[in-house]
Amino acid sequence: MASPVTTRTVRPLDTLRFDTSGPPEIMKAVADRLRRLGAEAADHAPGDSPTGHTLLTGGDFQPAEAHTTWSGPGTGIGDEATVQAATGIMAVHGRRDGAPRGLAADYSATATAVLTVQGMLAGLLAQARGAAAPTRLTTRADHAGLLSVSQYLAAAGADEGEAAEIAPGGPPFTSADGVLFELETLDPGAWAGFWRALDAPADAIRSGWRPFQFRYATACAPFPHVLHTTTQAHALERIRRAASASGAEVCVLGTLADRAAEHDGAAPWSLDLLRPTGPGNGAPAPTPARPLAGLTVLEAGRRIQAPLAAHLLGLLGAEVIRIEPPGGDPLRGMPPACSGISARWLALNRGKQAVEIDIKSPGDRRRLREMAAEADVFLHNWAPGKAAELGLDADDLAEVNPALVHAYTSGWGDRLPDAPMGTDFMVQARTGVGEAVRPEGEPPAPSLMTLLDVLGGLIGTEAVLAGLLLRERTGHGVRVDSSLLGAADTLTAPALARAVRGENPRKPSGFRRPLPTADGWIAPSDDCATAAAAYDLRNLSTDEALRQCRAHGLTATPVTTDLSGLHDDPRFAGSISRDTHGVLSVPDPWSFA
């Protein structure tokens, strides 16, 4: 077998130059991503304006142009705080605490930056495949925010309502020596064994499993409080022994300073060239609105990260074929349902074809290799080492399809050798995200909103598009690796930079805390927050509170607390609709012209 050609220095945007201007929270992240992809910045400093603009030129491409806004006109949404408030991010993130709470990290701005670069990569890929039109697209931060909560929105709008209790509560836990830690297990037996080893009450162990298990879906975990008092009675060393004996895992909450000290500066993905591809597949030229038309993606993903990445590739025009186990994906039956199918599952998987494959069967593995021989992308998030064990790793599939882009979306990207289980909340815990999302003066706590699964899915899409463009420019197949760790470092990049400079990496006390009114909440924009907090609005209706803020020159917006009502919210008029199954669905995150 010929050895693959591998390198980590190849970049799909080599020879291109970019120019950016606009909101710094978004455009600095756009510029960083374009640099990592190989483009060079223009010589002059970027300007600052309410609307972002990115221009990418050079090589054999026509100019690629992106316009980025916080929202549509007249919505009152104009920065990170108001996007989080309007789209439901504050509501979902605040479920554990029983009230809306803003993320201290710029989550929607970060997601918007990734989506903007995705759109530009897709447009350049379309040009490389024969599209005649130049690349022009628009992205909106409020649409990125809606995409981030799309699963929660789908569940809230289901006819039968949420299947698990939405109430305050959840990790992290605290040991007797005052150490905050996250607990993880996907096995009810390991859950029970861990708590029995710490002498927790049997009824609390039984009743605590379901809310703990469902916290990925509900963003809260209202298990019995006695489980917290149980861990507070034991030193961390005993807690670790209980986890080791039961098969559960614990992860002490890391700090941003610690993560900054160990961070190697690696990009959130890696691209490795494989074999020369040979002749192209003869697919028809794509259109500007569907830049991936004619391409086929095989997706062997579960939960959120890989399915979301494939979903976005499908929205860009690719044909997505989902590889499911015999009997179908069990998450299709996860409540609540619409038309008999899980609303959450439909939020990420509607429109995909499905083929059942038993990867334990040699015959089915041969069948999967035959499918990969006709595909452009093979995308999976199996456990580390699983693809190689099955003979389905990048080098294996390159034998049958040298032109394949083999994409692996993992937890840790094989970058932290002593890392725990690579799930969203464990990666948040290990990397200091628990500090980044809470301001100074509040105990660190990873969000129970699946921040990294979603952002990791977005970064996975970006990586696949970079790999496809690199394939067109080099004539080689490509291995692509992305991870939740890369998503964490992307989200916390500004805080890590402050830590490196010796500054406090956390935002000040009270940052992005919405203000209560008589009948709801309002969120002032970040630049008006201090002034708005000086007013007592608790005896005013939300409408009256907004009028008072505006009379004093302050910008604010109502906080969405009921996601099921978002499709009637005038701030998103015509944006949110119901699909053929009746599930509330969010708009595509890009608009191509």
Image: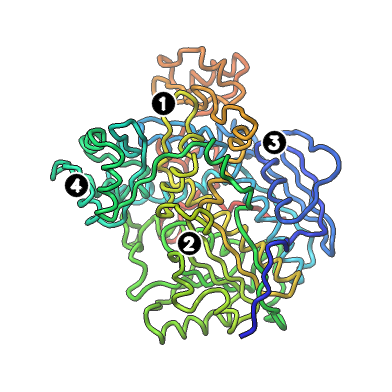
Apparent side of residue 228 relative to residue 89 in the rendered image (left or right): left
Rate crowding at label 3 as few (under 14), some (14 to 19) or many (20 or more) other CA atoms within 10 Å.
many
Asked whether 112 or 492 is in front, the reply is 492
Label 2 sits on a secondary structure element that is helix
- Work out which quarter of the rendered image holds the N terminus and state it: bottom right
How far apart marks 2 and 3 lie (CA) works out to 30 Å
Question: How far from the left and from the top, in percent, is residue 10?
Answer: 73, 63
Res. 307 mark: 2
Label 3 sits on a secondary structure element that is loop
Q: What is the three-letter code of the residue carrying label 2?
A: Pro
How far apart marks 3 and 1 lie (CA) works out to 29 Å
Q: With respect to residue 71, does 192 lie above or below? A: below
Label 1 sits on a secondary structure element that is loop
Say which residue label 1 marks: 520
Apparent side of residue 37 relative to residue 105 in the rendered image (left or right): right
Say which residue label 4 marks: 197
Query: Based on the displayed image, in which of its 4 quarters is residue 177 positioned?
Result: top left
Q: What is the three-letter code of the residue carrying label 3?
A: Pro
